[in-house]
Amino acid sequence: MSTIHKSPWLLHYDGSSCNGCDIEVLACTTPVYDVERFGVINTGNPMHADIFLITGGINSQNADVVKQIYEQMPQPKVVIAVGTCACTGGIFKECYNIKGGADTVIPVDIYVPGCAARPESIIDGVVKGVALFKEKAAALKASEKAN
Amino acid sequence: MTIQTRVIFAICYLILCPFIIGLLDGFDRKISARMQGRRGPSVLQPFFDLKKLFEKEFLTANKSQLFMIRSYLCFIVLSGILFFAGFDLLLVVFSLSTAAMFLILASTSTHSPYSAQGTHRELVQIMSCEPMELLVAVGFYLAAETFNISEIIAGTASPYIMYLPGFFVGFVFILTIKFRKSPFDIATSHHAHQEVIKGVTSEMVGKEYAMVTLAEWYENGILLGIVGLFFLTNNILSVIGAVAAILVVWFLEILIDNTSARVKWQLMLKLAWGVTIVAAGMNLFLLEIIKG
Ligand code: SF4
């Protein structure tokens, strides 16, 4: 039986945001929402992370950072864009240095809209991400067997 | 101790230790969460984490790292076998420090600044704990006149805590550091901390990190075993007392962890040496006087 989905470790990166969504992400780890009950650990290390949670848009300075973090994460991995900024660029979209949402540099699996995204919808997104993580792990295993 | 009992004890350690310590770790997270007013994860969470790490893709910056980590695990397990099969206590302490050297080598084999920072902290941590570990062995020698663990246990009718209370206090104090609970900014502190990321384990991916976790469980088994040694006598019933003492110490560590969340490594170094010198030193002195 695969239990891989019971241990999703999360890496939170703040792109070009107003910090509104970041506060809500942190709120998820507080006693009121307690994401740790799903086995989620908020890790600071891409090499230990399974879920890449990104808030805020992509600008010309952080584009490379986001790409590098994504590449450092071992497979299977899931990317969740939290907040309108991370989904499309949001309120900053028209700024001269903004490229747009997270999907302009890395493939995004799950979009959590909202300005700011509410903790309930963030947890919802994480739970969906966890289901996808399980699927990806199974696919990875199958492809390893095939090789 | 006959050779058969030694083999049985060694096998029990090999098989049971990860399960018991993993489960204790699970309860630890649950109790910590409750202390913070959260529900916390399932008590089996440490096993889910370990299994996942083994299933992740393996990326490494330096191939020799895997070899170092395997050696680290082997030396820890070897120390555990020496301890639980009742061999030399001094040898156990030395073999544990050899294992720690492999962890240092593994983390320095990559050139990540976080690993480097973590290695520095790990060395400071070794510096603060090692004297006490060595003194515990010396204490048992002075009280029992042997380093041999099976003879230490067989040779007494009253528990060693009566002769070695200072050593016990000092040892319990460094356990907080050895379990990587407090201070929060040491090497691979289990708390989310951005300054050193994950310290020595920053560059360890998937199965490497899983092996380090496993090694930590085996090591914690030995450390809790040493706590038990303070309460064991030649009477078989003393095992109950030893297990109770281990559980009390374990709970105490969780309590310290949750009430001293912001202790830093500088304070750790001062306190650990202070406690070692005062508690173990006084005890050593008194022991010498009693023995005359
Ligand atoms: S989506 Fe709204 S709250 Fe979130 S980072 Fe953007 S502007 Fe701030």
Image (cartoon, rainbow, N blue to C red):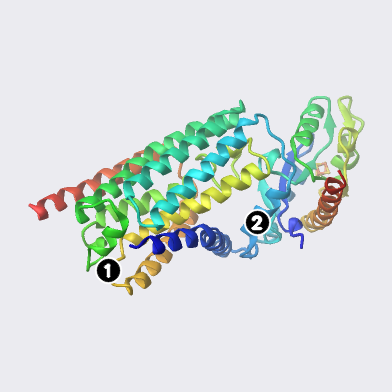
Q: Residues within 10 Å of mark 1 (few under 14, many from 20)?
A: some
- Looking at the image, can residue B251 be seen? no
Task: Please determine if labels 2 and 1 lie on a single subunit.
Answer: no
User: Can you give x and y, in whole percent of width and height, for residue B230 in the image?
Assistant: 30, 60
User: Can you give x and y, in whole percent of width and height, for residue A23 in the image?
Assistant: 71, 47
Identify which amino acid the numbered label 1 is placed on. Asn
Q: Nearer the viewer, residue A43 or A119?
A: A43
Identify which amino acid the numbered label 2 is placed on. Thr
- Looking at the rendering, which quadrant does residue B64 occupy? top right
Q: Secondary structure at mark 1?
A: loop
The reply to whether callout 2 and callout 1 are in contact (CB within 8 Å) is: no
Q: Residues within 10 Å of mark 2 (few under 14, many from 20)?
A: some
User: Can you give x and y, in whole percent of width and height, for residue A56 in the image?
Assistant: 81, 38
- Looking at the rendering, which quadrant does residue A81 occupy? top right
> Which residue is labeled 1 in the image?
B234
Query: Residue at left 43%, top 62%?
Result: B9
Residue A16 left/right relative to B261: right
Query: Residue at left 80%, top 46%?
Result: A76
Q: Nearer the viewer, residue B203 or A104?
A: B203
Looking at the image, is B69 positioned above or below residue A136? above
Viewer-nearest of labels 2 and 1?
1
Residue B162 left/right relative to A119: left
Pointer 1 indicates a residue of which chain? B
Determine the residue located farthest toward the front in the rendered image.
Answer: B3
Q: Image quadrant for the C terminus of chain A? A: top right
Determine the residue located farthest toward the bottom in the rendered image.
Answer: B237
Residue B49 left/right relative to A50: left
> Which residue is labeled 2 in the image?
A30
Pointer 2 indicates a residue of which chain? A
Q: Secondary structure at mark 2?
A: loop
Residue B46 left/right relative to B240: right
